[in-house]
Image (cartoon, rainbow, N blue to C red):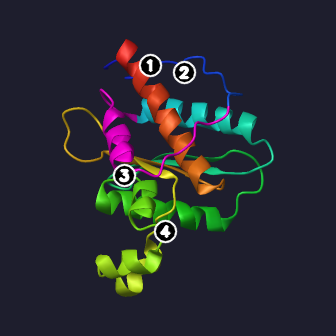
Amino acid sequence: MAEPLYQAPREVPTSRPLLSCFPDLSRIETLEQSLRLPGFDSDSAFTLGTSLRSRLRTLYPHSPALISIALSSGQVLFLCSTSPGVTPDNHVWVARKMRTVSRFGVSSWYMGIKFAGDEAAFAAKYGLGESAGEYAIHGGAVPIRVRGVEGPVGVLVVSGLKQDEDHMAAVEALTALREDLDKE
């Protein structure tokens, strides 16, 4: 049996505030491309999800959020809430954000900035018609990419905080995972 891709989370200072998002498409794209991992499996998904949950529980102890990590096939590898209070609506937002990343290959934050939050313009541009409500251009879903693989292999989604916080929590968690995997 092969060794798991990722063994243990590194010690991340969980109380440091999230970094700020930036509304610049080229910077968002550059950042997303820099998040390519050397590999990704269920062990790394579990570590990514549990470390992200710990961080969000520290930063937002009274703000429930839902974390979902799924492969591009739709297979869910990790799903949990950060605290009591997650509602079925959070699951709907996760699905909508995930569809956006899966279809367009960029973060839901990127698409929100690209269309200045104008969901009608987004829907019209891509001819979404009646299916427009199945997509969300609000931050929180980030593609999971692996070096040497074209296109995302999965999606990390955070739902329940402000959209910029959802987005940066996901970005920072992927950054920490990439740094840890690059050390191995």
Q: Nearer the viewer, residue 167 or 39?
A: 167
Q: Which residues are magenta?
A: 17-41
Q: Position of residue 59 (x, y in %)?
A: 72, 37
Contact (CB < 8 A) between labels 2 and 1? yes
Contact (CB < 8 A) between labels 3 and 2? no
Q: Where 128 sits versus 35, above or below?
A: below
Comes first in the chain, label 1 or label 3: 3
Q: Quadrant of the C terminus?
A: top left
Residue in view at x 52 percent, y 34 percent? 173
Residue at numbered disc 3: 25
Q: CA distance from mark 3 to mark 4?
A: 13 Å
Which dot, 3 or 2, sits closer to the camera? 3
Which dot, 1 or 3, sits closer to the camera? 3
**Quarter of the view holding residue 12:** top right
Q: CA distance from mark 3 to mark 2?
A: 30 Å
Q: Position of residue 42 (x, y in %)?
A: 42, 35
Residue at numbered disc 4: 117
